[in-house]
Amino acid sequence: MAHTIAGSAGAGRVLHGDRAGFGDRHAAAQAESGFIYYCDRFTRPQPFRADIVVSIDDVFEKKVNMLDAHASQFYEWLPWTEGQFEQVPKDPAERRKWLAAGPLASRKLQPEWRKALQKRYGAQAGRIQHAEAFEITEYGQQPSEEEIRRLFPFFPDR
């Protein structure tokens, strides 16, 4: 799924392209939009490139809670598609631990992710355990570092 970064100076937001009727309730962006992809494992037409990597250490439990709330997706459908349905624990507490430790909640930090974390988190990057990565697409606006920091305001100061 592609996400759109839309906004003008001082106001940015991430829009989901799959929201029906979005334009009926929201004004059009005043500036050219940029697009980012969330990380995936696809290699064609080209492998994912981690342009922006965000630490989620401080919200990882919230992410697991969110995934846990979607039981049919994360304990039935997705494990079934990966041939892991029989590995899903029946006990709710054990099931949640299984989810938190697995690839659906916690992707392994790739070496190139570490480089991107270092760029924005400096010395803190080595301590980051959980992150999410995004690729800036060739479509639309190519955000500057200043724009990226405005759209992701939680990056520490350099």
Image (tube, rainbow, N blue to C red):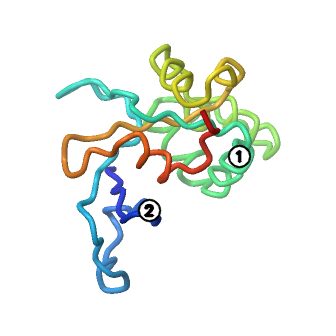
Instruction: Say which residue label 2 marks.
Output: 12
The local secondary structure at tag 2 comes to strand
Q: Residue at 55%, 31% (x, y): give it.
A: 120
Q: Residue at 70%, 33% (x, y): give it.
A: 98
Left or right, 140 with respect to 57, comes to left
Residue type at mark 1: give it: Val
| Residue toward you, 92 or 113 | 113
Q: Which quadrant is home to the C terminus?
A: top right
Q: Residue furthest bottom?
A: 24
Q: Which of marks 1 and 2 is in front?
A: 2
- Nearer the N terminus, badge 1 or badge 2? 2
The local secondary structure at tag 1 comes to helix
Q: Residues within 10 Å of mark 1 (few under 14, many from 20)?
A: few
User: Where 47 sits versus 13, above or below?
Assistant: above
| Residue toward you, 148 or 79 | 148
Q: Where is residue 106 in the image (x, y as percent from the top left)?
A: 61, 32
The disc placed on residue 59 is 1
Q: Which quadrant of the figure has residue 15?
A: bottom left
Q: Where is residue 152 in the image (x, y as percent from the top left)?
A: 52, 49
Q: Residue at 31%, 75% (x, y): give it.
A: 20
